[in-house]
Amino acid sequence: MIEFKNVTKRYGDKLAVDNVSFRINEGEIFVLIGPSGSGKTTTLKMINRLIPLSEGYIYFKEEPISNYEVYEMRRDMGYVLQQIALFPHMTISENIAQVPQMENWSDEDINKRIDELLEMVGLDPETYKDRKPSELSGGQQQRIGVLRALAADPPVILMDEPFSALDPITRENFQNDLLELQNKINKTIVFVTHDIAEAMKLADRLCLFNEGQVEQIGLPEEFIESPASSFVEQFIGKVNQDLNLTAGELVAELSVAETESEYPVVKEQADITEIFRLLSNNEAVLVETESGPKKLSRSQVFGYLADKRGVTS
Ligand code: ADP
Ligand code: MG
């Protein structure tokens, strides 16, 4: 769907992105992760031509992006920013309607689309359509930011740390919403974050940046089972060596609910590697304990490990 071939971006003699190649598949959530200043935003903005590249090629649907008009890129690629970027003087409807209007949709189609989108994220259209952004909570405004990117039904969504300004609980809700939404809409999503827990939770595949270069690309479990470098190990937190945790110890650390659902079951003695392997394909595992099965969710475990080592940027 999107391919980078030896892409470099220079600012003066500063290499912001350094000879990067990768391919993003249709329908996947591809997460660009890395420390602050490692080149994630620059990479994302080169995709929709907000930033011109210095060397190399980027292809969209097998064609160089230079073959597309800039307005076509904007139409085909919804864009969600970290900071809420709604127009304050416009209503929620007007904010959502921007791209469809540019595309000359009929008023009737636009109205239908607005209702459909608001309903999709559980906001009652009659209540919210005519409000101004300031009459919504921060979380609701960011939700509208996501809807605006989806409005004209683009095949690609680019998201640059869209949830990082939100408090941890709202943030977790958004992550769950995004995964749920993706089940319905099945877009190609390029998602930038510096938070390893968020990346592990959302990614179909991860691409880890370090100083403008790609350190490793692959499935979340590949980062854990076979980190490509010591930088990768460090970034994901050297879970295997540093934290000799068993499932039982995690249960003792984290508050867990008993549940009857169909998650894979592990023994209390199971080590962290086994738990990771299971969590890369399942939302949770059940740990057998004397007092019955206890659930450990993926976000709990990764959130815990990230907190533990202060891995936030
Ligand atoms: P990230 O999103 O991973 O935090 P960026 O892509 O924003 O990183 O930046 C990568 C590098 O390029 C950083 O060192 C940053 O300072 C530099 N950079 C980004 N934008 C500019 C610019 N407009 N002019 C000069 N340097 C820039
Ligand atoms: Mg950035």
Image (cartoon, rainbow, N blue to C red):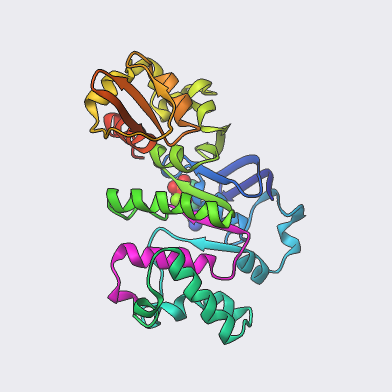
Residue beneath the point at 34% across and 13% down: 269
Residue beneath the point at 38% across and 26% down: 237
Residue beneath the point at 30% across and 72% down: 136
Expressed as whole percent of the image width and height from the top left, the position of residue 176 reads: 41, 49
The answer to which image quadrant residue 312 occupies is: top left
Expressed as whole percent of the image width and height from the top left, the position of residue 254 reads: 24, 30
Q: Does residue 12 sit above or below 206 in this rendering?
A: below
Q: Does residue 141 sit above or below 262 in this rendering?
A: below
Residue with the most extreme front position? 260
The answer to which image quadrant residue 71 occupies is: bottom right
Magenta-colored stretch includes residue 139: yes
Q: Is residue 11 visible?
A: no
Left or right of 254 in this view: 153: right
Q: Does residue 172 sit above or below 309 in this rendering?
A: below
Q: Is residue 91 visible?
A: yes
Tell which of 98 and 259 is nearer to you: 259
Magenta-tinted stretch: 133-161
Please state, as top left, top right, bottom left or bottom right, where the C terminus lies in the image.
top left
Residue with the most extreme bottom position? 107
Magenta-colored stretch includes residue 232: no
Tell which of 211 and 64 is nearer to you: 64
The answer to which image quadrant residue 17 occupies is: top right
Residue with the most extreme top position? 269
Tell which of 24 and 33 is nearer to you: 24
